[in-house]
Amino acid sequence: MGVLVKLIDALLFLLLLVIAFEKPLIEAQACLPGDLYPNILVDLRNWYARESGDYLMTEMPDFYVGIMWVELVFQLPLVFINLYGILTGKPWFNITCLSYGISLFTSMVPIFAELTGSGRAPDKLLTLYFSFLSLGVLAILRGLLPTSSTKSSASIGKRPASGRKKKV
């Protein structure tokens, strides 16, 4: 079980690292003023929207902008907290990973419903958003797995034995 947890942690770390750069540089352009971003990032976002057929990113419906605000204000800090938690093996990582996974999955459901319900999304775009939906499920499952630390649960909360003998 420990090897599986370490493998999932490594995969999550790589995906979260990509998201740590992608969210504020590309997706946040949906809710922040355009003059905050250099032309190269605006062009990159426009290229992505054209190549993938992401009509949500070009049309920016109100629900999509709202979800981008949630991702920027709530999920992005959790991404950085989870990256730190994976690197340092913090015991609270399960809770923050579970919180991130539930939030990501919850925000992807209406987007995925719009894409599949409208019939306008190409398969390439559905695959891309399905990967984010899958990342949410993976983060939820990782949050439910035991921690991968080397300490046993029996030693948590117990003080180490003192090297001195008691005086009687």
Image (cartoon, rainbow, N blue to C red):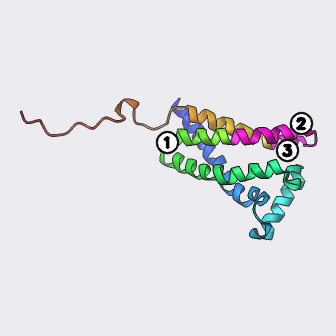
Say which amino acid is labelled 2. Gly
Could you tell me how far apart the alpha carbons at marks 3 and 1 are, in whole angstroms? Answer: 34 Å
Q: Residue furthest left?
A: 168
Residue in the picture at 81% in, 70% down: 39
Q: Image check: 143 left or right of 44?
A: left
Q: Is residue 98 above or below residue 26?
A: above
Q: Is residue 116 above or below residue 79?
A: above
Residue in the picture at 88% in, 40% down: 123
Q: Earlier in the sequence, mark 2 or mark 1?
A: 1
Q: Which residue is mark 3?
A: 125
Q: Which residue is mark 2?
A: 117
Q: Position of residue 134 (x, y in %)?
A: 72, 37
Q: Which residue is mark 1?
A: 92
Disc 3, SS: helix
Q: Position of residue 100 (x, y in %)?
A: 63, 43
Tell me if I can see residue 143 in this picture.
yes
Disc assigned to residue 166: none
Q: Is residue 62 above or below residue 151?
A: below
Say which amino acid is labelled 3. Leu
The magenta segment is 104-128
